[in-house]
Image (tube, rainbow, N blue to C red):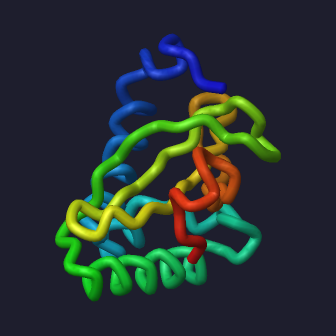
Amino acid sequence: MQSLKDFNNTHHSAAINRIWFAIMEMNSFTLEMLLDAKIDYEDIGKDKFIEKLYDRFQDHKTWGDSELFLDLASCNGCNCNQAVCVFTGIYSDKKFALFFEIKNNKITDIYECYAFGEEDDFIPF
């Protein structure tokens, strides 16, 4: 779990904020520039991970969403009681959650969380 002291490093918090904003804007081009190619996101690699997000963004656009809201929830599964980022369509209200694994003030992985909130709260991608 991340504490406030983990976000005191302005470079660290700025980097995470830029990634969050890119997801909220549904901007896969910006994610391509921000995400580290050396990280095997979700065990599928950077390119496949961004492609998966792009497909999700397209679904949201089909549902009428022009952007996503960001909220924090608690994982009820493998990352028990740790914070997950819940992205919600501003029009559709459809949700998905991503867990940001952070070690030594750096993102080491990002992957989907299926165990947050109520079961009907999200749609897996």
Image height check: is 105 above or below 125? above
Q: Position of residue 60 (x, y in %)?
A: 33, 77
Specify whether 37 is left or right of 45: left
Residue at 76% x, 70% y is 43
Specify whether 87 is left or right of 18: right
Q: Position of residue 27 (x, y in %)?
A: 29, 71
Q: Position of residue 44 (x, y in %)?
A: 71, 77
Image quadrant containing the N terminus:
top right
Image height check: is 92 above or below 39? below
Residue at 56% x, 16% y is 3
Residue at 44% x, 79% y is 56
Residue at 28% x, 81% y is 63
Image height check: is 27 above or below 75? below
Image height check: is 68 above or below 43? above
Q: Which residue appears farthest toward the top when viewing the image?
A: 5
Residues 120 and 68: in front is: 120
